[in-house]
Image: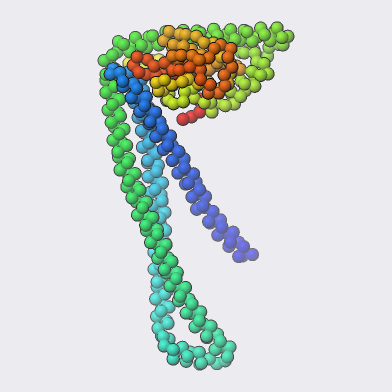
Amino acid sequence: MKALYKLAFFLLLLSFPLATLAQKQKSKAQLQKEKKENLNRIKEANRILQQTKVQKQASIGQLNAIKEKITVQKGVIRNISKEINYIQSDVEETEDKVTALQNDLDKLKKEYAAMVYAASKTANSYNKLMFVFASDSFNQLVMRLRYLQQYSEGRKKQVAQINKTQAVLTDQLNVLESKKKQKESLLNKQLAENKNLQGLKVQQDSVVSKLSKQEQNLKQEVAQRQQSVKKLDKLIADIVREEIARAAREARAAGKASSAGAGKVTLTPETALISSSFAGNKGHLSWPVERGFISQGFGRHNHPVLKGVVTENRGIDIQTTQGATARAIFEGKVLTVASVPGMNNIVMIQHGEYFTVYAKLKTVSVSPGQTVKLKDVIGTVYTDPNGTTELQFQVWKNSANLNPATWLLHK
């Protein structure tokens, strides 16, 4: 029973380092995933930045692309710091193993030295024979022969153990040296990435300085955008209101009592299913463009250049590459295709009681009443004279404006 308890205790002790190792491997895998994602984001930001640089004049789109690069660059540096911490942890663990192996080796060598010294006293064959034949009985003689044999085997095992421990120690020392070189390489890389970050900040300050000299033009752009936003808001509100009224009329015509309540779309069993599925995919919905980054988030924001100027965004602006296509983020029905000055072409898709809006489109490839599926192309994104390609994307539930960033898959 005691043996079983000892075995259970030993297995329990083993489980702790194994669990720690599994957790570390999982964390390292996540680190590699983040590293890959950061590299992809940097490539996207570089591609977008180069397109905005085609025009010599500084623009908000160019500033947004630089900000995205700074954000990703900080992520790269954090990623390297985490990697250094993991390697430092590995170095410390390996150093502990090396110390333990060196102690074991010293102990084995001392034990072997004592064994050799004891053996030297009976080194010649005469002494061994005297030891055997001096036995008081045959049983004692057999026992002494067995003892000499075991003693000889013990010395051989001791030598083998010393050699094995020495080999493991050498391997661990090589591992330790490799880990230290990895750490040194990462530290050098971190210094280089910090230098890149400082360069981006200088670049950002330069663009802000150039934009500050265009204050009058920027104020005019803000005013025009606010007018465009108001017109788009009115268009969306009117369309949603009309859809609510239409669905209610159809329900009454079919002799069904509306259970939607005031200001809500009356759902059929089919549209209720789509609506429920849309809601269930919150946080996992596909992006409306294949590549890009959020250049302006939802809600109120201070202008990146103009002091004291606050802008309000009903959705999110997604800056992407020139020629990019806009895609439906979920199955639904095209409710309307329209045009708003400053927002270009607009497509509005209904998903039960939810609505998605795609604005700033150059071309549109769908028509009202058309059913679309996930990732169906609905048009191409407009590129302004400054080389900025940006989609305005909104999500509504009935007449309530929602933050699209919380609905899309996190990049």
Q: Is residue 193 above or below residue 330?
A: below
One can see residue 241 in this view: yes
Q: Position of residue 331 (x, y in %)?
A: 58, 21
Q: Percent from the top left, x then y, of residue 376?
A: 53, 21
Residue at the spot 42% in from the left edge and 69% down from the top edge: 162
Q: Position of residue 370 (x, y in %)?
A: 58, 14
Percent position (x, y) of residue 121?
A: 41, 85
Identify the residue at image location x=34%, y=24%: 49
Is residue 323 left or right of 256 when viewed as pictured?
Answer: left
Q: Is residue 265 left or right of residue 154?
A: right
Q: Is residue 153 above or below residue 3?
A: below
Q: Which one is nearer the viewer's eye here, 337 or 159? A: 337
Residue 275 figure quarter: top right
Q: Height in image: 109 above or below 198?
A: below
Quadrant assignment, res 226: top left
- The residue that appears at 47% across and 92% down in the rendered structure is 130
The image quadrant that residue 73 belongs to is top left
The quadrant of the picture occupied by the N terminus is: bottom right
